[in-house]
């Protein structure tokens, strides 16, 4: 009997070890999918709307690139376009909606990895009604659409934006409902020409008029915190005015910034040079609230650089159009 009991115990131990191994493998596979570096697609995202003072409405868009490393370049055209249609007209993805006259609504053509929320806006008239502003994007032969509408469930405010981007460490402070984005001004012309290999000087001035959310000097993660354990679906970042340049249109691989610019997309990996990345300290505001940089291109072409100022919860954008010649 004791032999049978020992045999039963050994079988139970072996079964427990086997189950533990299976669960460990499943967990590893799940984490592997979450950390897919390449091979996934990018999808447009409709973030919501709010009313403008003049009676029109502002629609907010962004995107999700499911890769952690791979980036895409998709020119304005049949694979990256907007359509202005009636409700439900493009619900069927097999229905073509490309119209040259409406295709370009200021969307990006370069797609960085991961979540890029509230990246651009489109104003629609007061009588937009039940119409839809539909963004169609195709990557890796996969078509996806985002449907911008004025449905009540999509109405947002600055606090919602802050919550969605993990601003101010995920704070729900009611004062964030009236938070205004930073003031941002680019020095110099908005259209410039430069040769391949020739540095182009860039300078902006930015300020945060309402000082919301309140800056905590030097903090990106909480004091002494190297790793931020997940406490919500959205990763968090610290408050404080900051500025960075990105390539909005044109291949980003052809542009080199000095100094290197921090990422404006939600890269939450440790030491990823992103405000959502631990441990990241929000840089001190430079003297005179003036940020300077230079960019050099190694290929000719048409590029749009986007300067992004943020207080950690709201964003302001300014573009510089650059023609690069040989």
Image (tube, grey):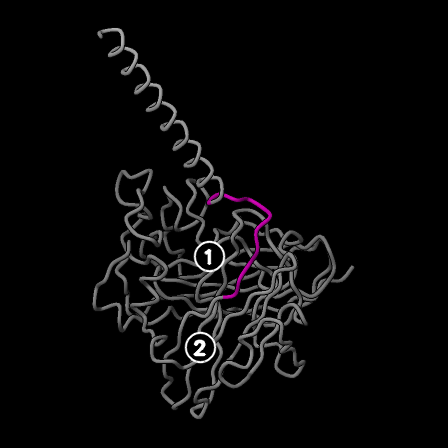
Query: What percent of the width, then of the height, locates residue 143?
Result: 60, 64
Q: Is residue 171 magenta?
A: no
* Alpha-carbon span between mark 1 and mark 2: 18 Å
Residue 46 location, quadrant:
bottom left
Q: Which residues are magenta?
A: 34-44
Image quadrant assignment for residue 208 = bottom left
Judged left or right of residue 204, residue 101 is: right
Mark closer to the chain start, 1 or 2? 2
Q: Which residue is mark 2?
A: 59
- Residue closest to the eye, 202 or 238: 238
Q: Residue at x 29, y 39 (%)?
A: 225
Residue visible at 31% across and 62% down?
A: 163
Figure disc tally: 2
Q: Provide the secondary structure element on which disc 1 rests.
A: strand
Overall secondary structure of the magenta section = loop
Is 43 in the magenta?
Answer: yes
Question: Which numbered tag is attached to residue 159?
Answer: none
Q: Which residue is denoted by mark 1 in the rendering?
A: 115
Q: Is residue 317 above or below residue 70?
A: below
Give the quadrant of the C terminus.
bottom right
User: Which structural element holds mark 2?
Assistant: strand
Crowding at mark 1 (Cα within 10 Å: few <14, some 14-19, many 20+): many
For the view shown, which residue lies furthest in the front direction?
A: 1
Name the residue: 65% across, 66% down: 322
> Which residue is most to the bottom?
127
């Amino acid at each position: 009997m004791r032999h049978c009991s020992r045999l039963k115990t050994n079988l139970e131990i072996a079964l427990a070890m086997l189950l533990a191994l299976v669960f460990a493998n499943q967990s590893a596979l799940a984490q592997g999918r979450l950390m897919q570096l390449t091979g996934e697609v990018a999808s447009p995202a409709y973030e919501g709307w709010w009313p403008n003072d003049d009676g029109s409405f502002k629609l907010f868009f962004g995107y999700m690139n499911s890769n952690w490393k791979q980036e895409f370049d998709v020119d304005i055209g049949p694979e990256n376009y907007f359509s202005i249609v009636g409700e439900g007209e493009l619900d069927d993805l097999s229905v073509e909606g490309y119209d040259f006259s409406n295709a370009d609504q200021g969307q990006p053509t370069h797609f960085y990895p991961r979540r890029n929320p509230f990246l651009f806006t489109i104003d629609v008239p007061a009588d937009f009604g039940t119409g839809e502003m539909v963004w169609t994007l195709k990557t890796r032969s996969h078509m996806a659409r985002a449907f911008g509408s004025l449905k009540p469930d999509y109405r947002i405010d600055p606090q919602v934006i802050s919550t969605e981007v993990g601003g101010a460490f995920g704070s729900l402070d009611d004062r964030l409902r009236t938070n205004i984005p930073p003031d941002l001004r680019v020095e110099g012309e908005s259209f410039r020409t430069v040769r391949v290999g020739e540095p182009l000087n860039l300078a902006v001035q930015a300020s945060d008029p309402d000082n919301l959310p309140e800056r905590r000097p030097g903090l990106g993660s909480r004091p002494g915190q190297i790793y931020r354990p997940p406490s919500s679906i959205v990763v968090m970042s610290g408050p404080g005015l900051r500025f960075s340049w990105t390539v909005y249109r044109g291949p980003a691989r052809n542009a080199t910034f000095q100094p290197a610019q921090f990422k404006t997309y939600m890269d939450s990996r440790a030491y990823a040079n992103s405000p959502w990345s631990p441990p990241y300290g929000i840089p001190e505001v430079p003297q005179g609230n003036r940020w300077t940089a230079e960019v050099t291109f190694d290929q000719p072409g048409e590029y749009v650089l986007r300067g992004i100022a943020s207080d950690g919860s709201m964003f302001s954008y300014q573009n510089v159009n650059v023609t690069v010649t040989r």
